[in-house]
Image (spheres, grey):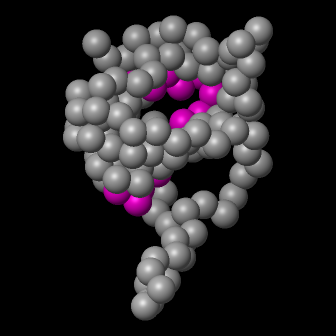
Amino acid sequence: MPHDIVLPGFERTDGRGVFREILNDGQWHSLISGTMNPNAVMGNHYHKRTVIFFYVTRGSVRIKTVHVETSATDEFVLSAHQGVFLQVNESHAINFLEESEFLMLKSLPYNPDDPDTYAFPVED
């Protein structure tokens, strides 16, 4: 099933700078930010209960997904100021094409006693 790439719903640029409304939907319990190096791969797992919104603030990534129940696959590139929802039972591999910064929202917080993370390789 193809993924919809999410673009900011509103952006204002003026003498003060840029104000960008990235997302105005959902209920989130965790906000993660990071910087990754070129060719780094994040993921190769899926979640049974956690929905993710992944957003690139700088750089670009290639994302491959496979649904663990239906075997549906997708592959696409996100550039700066683009995002995507990764659904439950959807294994994902995020390959950073260049040095990149990202934001990630998760519907459930990480719990080391119940991580809701299941290995399922999508990419080497």
Specify whether residue 100 is painted magenta.
no
Residue closer to the observer: 59 or 44: 59
Specify whether residue 88 is painted magenta.
yes
Residue 101 coordinates in the image, percent (x, y): 39, 46
Residue 115 coordinates in the image, percent (x, y): 69, 15
Asked whether residue 72 appears in the rendered view, the answer is: no
Question: Compared to 65, does 23 lie above or below?
Answer: below
Whether residue 100 sits left or right of residue 67 in the image: it is left
Quadrant in the rendering for residue 44 = top left
Dominant SS of magenta comes to: strand
Residue 38 coordinates in the image, percent (x, y): 23, 33
Question: Compared to 14, does 28 lie above or below?
Answer: above
Residue for point 23% across, 40% down: 98
Whether residue 48 sits left or right of residue 63 in the image: it is right
Asked whether residue 88 appears in the rendered view, the answer is: yes
Whether residue 92 sits left or right of residue 111 in the image: it is left
Which contiguous range is marked in magenta? 80-93
Residue for point 68% across, 16% down: 116
